[in-house]
């Protein structure tokens, strides 16, 4: 039996899962809904995590308009409504998925997913703003969005007034409803069931079901959940060595190979520098120690690596941990490229054919995939220290406090 289906089974028996009347003949499980939409386990995890995140960002009662947040967790949702007027997830209609995550399933083929008129955003993800209903209820929700539009109370009043013998024309004027609409309502031709009060779950019970489904879904796929957390951390929090606290860029903007996309823009413009002051204090000693193991010569000469090697001097070893590599050491040429031109993650770095072994001159290093980039610019002054490093960073911190927005 489906684990998520078993969570809801006790609730189905007493008919309290769905916020409408139903004979419960068309039940599905959450897994069935995701399977029908052709979504992978990783997609399920991302969808469930979006629910958890929205509750923290927007709260339970407000509209969860995904256009109001640029969080990378919502990247799977299509927010372009030029072709579709409803929220979509990975190419599929997201509304059945939203409803399933709150224990609401389509009772039969005549029912459609309806967005309540309490918010106007077609990008709303809040499950309490949706329900399964009939086409008549779709029309009613459209009316409720209009100024002086129809409501169940007005429908009930029209029908009750007609039973008391009042003229349809008088009722239409009294409640400001078009005559032909009032006539059909009074005759029972349309909105005939809209005066019935729909059964809705208490708020705490509704969100209890939703959170239970999210937690059960996440627990079922631990590997995908771990990968999701890592990808969101990389996309939102991870910093590259060129990041400076309080400064924009070089944080949470990485490509498929772990390359810093902000660094790539600067590499394209020819950036090339050997300057420890480009880096924050947390990187200072590591960057300084690396360049101290390189024999820095003329700007166009090879810079031999004087640090550790292995495999009979066939491979250089430089200590420089990277979140995208399992080991804590890299080749000296790769680290020289990272610290001289920009952080490029897992891309392999090459020296010129005529270079000496383990050359670390940033001007001699290339990445074959970056063919459209400008050649590295003039190195200029090579700066491996800046006097008393502690005074330097204290001064910068003092300036940042006096000028909000300045680098700390």
Image (cartoon, rainbow, N blue to C red):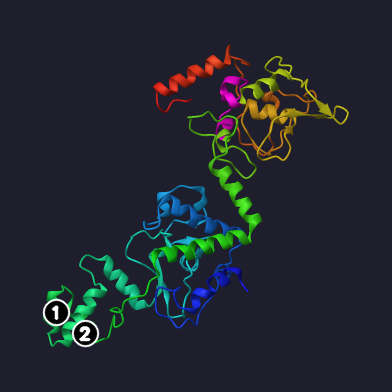
Residues packed near mark 2 inside 10 Å, few (<14), some (14 to 19) or many (20 plus)? many
Does 385 sit above or below residue 126? above
Does 383 sit above or below residue 370? above
Quadrant position of the N terminus in the picture? bottom right
Q: Which residues are magenta?
A: 265-282
Q: Position of residue 162 (x, y in %)?
A: 17, 85
Q: Is residue 204 left or right of residue 333?
A: left
Q: Position of residue 28 (x, y in %)?
A: 54, 75
Disc 1 is placed on an element classified as helix
Disc 2 is placed on an element classified as helix
Q: Position of residue 282 (x, y in %)?
A: 59, 26
Does 22 sit above or below residue 201? below
- CA–CA distance between discs 2 and 1? 10 Å
Quadrant housing residue 122: bottom left
Name the residue at 27% across, 70% down.
143
Tell me which label, 2 or 1, sits earlier in the chain: 1
Q: Is residue 327 left or right of residue 58?
A: right
Name the residue at 53% across, 16% down.
392
What is the tally of numbered marks visible in this picture? 2
Q: Position of residue 60 (x, y in %)?
A: 40, 57
Question: Is residue 266 shown in magenta?
Answer: yes
Q: Is residue 19 left or right of residue 359?
A: left
Question: Is residue 211 shown in magenta?
Answer: no
Q: Nearer the viewer, residue 289 or 102?
A: 102
Quadrant housing residue 243: top right
Q: Which mark is residue 171?
A: 1
Report the residue marked by disc 2: 186
Name the residue at 33% across, 60% down.
120
Contact check, label 2 and label 1, Cβ < 8 Å: yes
Does 317 sit above or below residue 17? above
């Amino acid at each position: 039996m489906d684990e998520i289906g078993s969570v809801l089974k006790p609730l189905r028996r007493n008919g309290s899962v769905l916020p409408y009347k139903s004979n419960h003949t068309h039940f599905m499980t959450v897994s069935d809904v995701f399977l029908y939409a052709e979504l992978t386990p990783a997609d399920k995890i991302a969808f469930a995590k979006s629910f958890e995140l929205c509750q923290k960002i927007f709260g339970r009662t407000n509209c969860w308009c995904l256009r109001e947040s640029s969080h990378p967790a919502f990247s799977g949702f299509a927010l372009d409504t030029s072709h579709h007027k409803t929220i979509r997830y990975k190419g599929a209609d997201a509304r059945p998925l939203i409803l399933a995550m709150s224990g609401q399933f389509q009772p039969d083929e005549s029912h459609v997913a309806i967005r309540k008129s309490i918010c106007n955003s077609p990008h709303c993800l809040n499950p309490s703003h949706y329900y399964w209903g009939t086409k008549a209820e779709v029309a009613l929700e459209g009316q409720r969005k209009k100024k002086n539009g129809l409501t169940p109370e007005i429908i009930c009043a029209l029908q009750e007034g007609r039973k008391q013998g009042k003229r349809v024309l008088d009722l239409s004027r009294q409640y400001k409803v078009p005559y032909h609409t009032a006539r059909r309502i009074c005759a029972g031709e349309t909105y005939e069931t809209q005066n019935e009060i729909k059964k809705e779950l208490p708020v705490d019970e509704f969100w209890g079901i939703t959170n239970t489904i999210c937690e059960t879904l996440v627990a079922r796929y631990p590997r995908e959940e771990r990968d999701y957390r890592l990808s969101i951390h990389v996309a939102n929090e991870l910093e590259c060595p060129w990041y400076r606290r309080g400064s924009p860029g070089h944080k949470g903007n990485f490509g498929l190979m772990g390359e810093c996309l902000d660094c790539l823009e600067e590499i394209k413009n020819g950036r090339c520098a050997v300057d420890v002051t480009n880096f924050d204090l947390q990187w200072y000693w590591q960057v300084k120690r690396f360049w101290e193991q390189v024999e820095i010569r003329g700007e166009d000469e090879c810079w031999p690596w004087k640090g550790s090697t292995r495999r009979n001097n066939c491979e250089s070893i430089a200590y420089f941990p990277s979140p995208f590599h399992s080991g804590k050491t890299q080749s000296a040429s790769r680290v020289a490229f990272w610290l001289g031109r920009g952080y490029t993650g897992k891309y392999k770095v090459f020296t010129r054919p005529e270079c000496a072994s383990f050359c670390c001159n940033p001007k001699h290093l290339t990445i074959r995939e970056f063919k459209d980039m400008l050649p590295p610019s003039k190195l200029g002054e090579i700066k491996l220290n800046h006097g008393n490093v502690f005074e330097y960073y204290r001064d910068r911190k003092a300036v940042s406090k006096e000028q909000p927005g300045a680098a700390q």
